[in-house]
Image (tube, grey):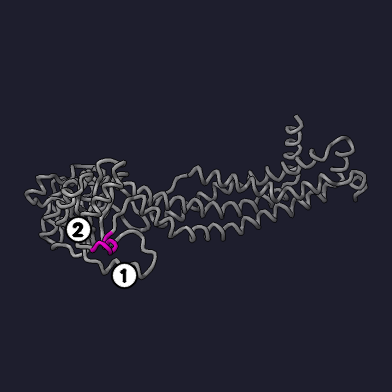
């Protein structure tokens, strides 16, 4: 009952001093909005990267010579010096790695695509075997991925991304149509489900063709190639990677006392590397934005101090009729918490809107995160307690006789 009564008195006091309450709210809103914008934007970007990496699946890893996150220029140059990974190793890996269920070699090129009068330049062209669809999570929207028979008979068929379909076949069924990749004719057999963009890069501007057909047109790759390997199960992943490592070291004639001249990457490993590289950068951004939060807290404390000074006689009257120190303390603390929590809720909404606008500039989408909302409410509550406790204690410790005689 006492808590409810104190809460009612706090609300009435805030409502009676709208200008002061508004200024306090403004300070909190600015602070929470700035922090939430950074947190929400970082959460959204990392979530988008994680969802993209999840396409590999929990039991899949990549064997390549250039990949991962290079932490220095020296490491990057060392990767470039490595001899390319040979796509002919696929059968050897599958034979030598008992825990490897599927091995899919991939090559990467770019080409200009033409369909009648429509053209699309610099399209990402991937050459792969038919089992890529079983290893990497490609969602098919129309038609199908190229088949084993297409690989065996080296049929000139193509699986296209949504951007290619929209550019060349707007309002027309793309399946069965013939397009030209750098002048060579291919038949469309399937269309991938739209994936959207990331960091300004269109992930739907691609085509996939059979591996041998790609080699015939573009030549055997010297560097732009890798293997996607699927272990028999998630539990076998580590052992499968060890077996694949032994096979590749043997095929590439790596001396026993030398480190690997290739990289085996899982989605979790790539994400961990990315997190470690960007951790300091992210902490710096949050730290800088937190300065405005501290300023907002100081505004709360200053205005609460003014409120205590203006209401000294009120405090004296309340004490003279039986209010205890803890009652006065709770009243002013409730006022600070109500103000900061309200400002925090508004700041969370504005921060999310600002973060969504920022992230949308690099062609990504974010959704409200539980972590972001909890962080925003925790921050606003913390501001109310930390910066409101001193004015509340000062009010609670006032001598009632001196307070009553205060002019």
Q: Nearer the observer, disc 2 or disc 1?
A: 2
| CA distance for labels 2 and 1 | 24 Å
Residue 109 visible to an observer of this rendering:
no
Q: Name the side, left or right, on which 48 lies relative to 86.
A: right
The residue under label 2 is 250
**Magenta span covers which residues?**
255-262
The N terminus - image quarter: top right
Q: Name the side, left or right, on which 263 lies relative to 1.
A: left
Count of numbered marks: 2
Q: Is residue 69 magenta?
A: no
Q: Position of residue 223 (x, y in %)?
A: 22, 64
**Residue occupying image coordinates x 18% and y 65%:** 222
**Residue occupying image coordinates x 56% and y 46%:** 375
The residue under label 1 is 77
- The local secondary structure at tag 2 comes to helix
Placement of 103 over or under 183, stated as above or below: above
Placement of 13 over or under 217, stated as above or below: above
Magenta span: predominant SS is loop
Q: Nearer the viewer, residue 126 or 242?
A: 242
Q: Name the side, left or right, on which 370 lies relative to 30.
A: left
Q: Is residue 259 magenta?
A: yes
Q: Quadrant of residue 200?
A: bottom left
Q: Position of residue 238 (x, y in %)?
A: 31, 47
Label 2 vs 1, first from the N-terminus: 1
Q: Position of residue 367 (x, y in %)?
A: 45, 45
Q: Position of residue 153 (x, y in %)?
A: 6, 49
Q: Name the side, left or right, on which 16 lies relative to 101.
A: right
Q: How many residues crowd around disc 2 within 10 Å: few (fewer than 14), some, or many (20 or more)?
A: few
**Residue occupying image coordinates x 51% and y 55%:** 38
Callouts 2 and 1 close, C-beta under 8 Å: no
């Amino acid at each position: 009952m006492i808590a409810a009564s104190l809460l009612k008195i706090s609300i009435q006091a805030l409502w009676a001093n709208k200008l002061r309450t508004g200024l306090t709210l403004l300070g909190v809103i600015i602070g929470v909005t700035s922090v939430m914008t950074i947190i929400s934007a970082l959460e959204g970007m990392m979530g988008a990267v994680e969802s993209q990496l999840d396409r590999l699946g929990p039991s899949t890893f990549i064997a390549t010579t250039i990949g991962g996150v290079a932490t220095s220029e020296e490491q990057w140059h060392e990767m470039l010096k490595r001899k390319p990974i040979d796509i002919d190793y696929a059968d050897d890996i599958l034979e030598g790695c008992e825990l490897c269920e599927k091995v899919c070699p991939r090559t990467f090129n770019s080409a200009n695509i033409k369909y009648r009068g429509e053209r699309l330049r610099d399209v990402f062209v991937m050459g792969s075997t038919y089992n890529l669809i079983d290893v990497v999570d490609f969602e098919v929207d129309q038609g199908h991925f190229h088949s084993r028979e297409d690989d065996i008979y080296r049929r000139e068929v193509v699986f296209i991304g949504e951007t290619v379909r929209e550019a060349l076949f707007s309002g027309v069924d793309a399946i069965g149509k013939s397009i030209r990749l750098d002048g060579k004719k291919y038949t469309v057999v399937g269309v991938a489900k739209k994936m959207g963009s990331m960091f300004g890069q269109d992930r739907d501007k691609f085509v996939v063709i059979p591996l041998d057909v790609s080699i015939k047109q573009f030549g055997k790759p010297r560097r732009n190639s890798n293997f996607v390997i699927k272990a028999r199960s998630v539990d076998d992943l580590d052992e499968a990677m060890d077996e694949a490592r032994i096979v590749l070291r043997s095929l590439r004639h790596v001396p026993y006392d030398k480190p690997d001249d290739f990289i085996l990457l899982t989605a979790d490993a790539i994400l961990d590397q990315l997190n470690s590289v960007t951790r300091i950068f992210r902490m710096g951004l949050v730290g800088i934005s937190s300065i405005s939060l501290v300023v907002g807290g100081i505004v709360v404390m200053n205005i609460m101090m003014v409120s205590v000074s203006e209401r000294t006689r009120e405090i004296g009257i309340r004490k003279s009729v039986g209010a205890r120190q803890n009652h006065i303390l709770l009243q002013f603390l409730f006022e600070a918490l109500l103000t900061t929590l309200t400002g925090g809720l508004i700041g969370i909404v504005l921060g999310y809107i600002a973060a969504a606008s920022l992230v949308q500039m690099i062609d990504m989408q974010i959704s409200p995160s539980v972590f972001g909302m909890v962080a925003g409410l925790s921050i606003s509550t913390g501001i109310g307690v930390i910066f409101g406790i001193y004015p509340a204690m000062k009010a609670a410790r006032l001598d009632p006789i001196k307070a009553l005689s205060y002019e």
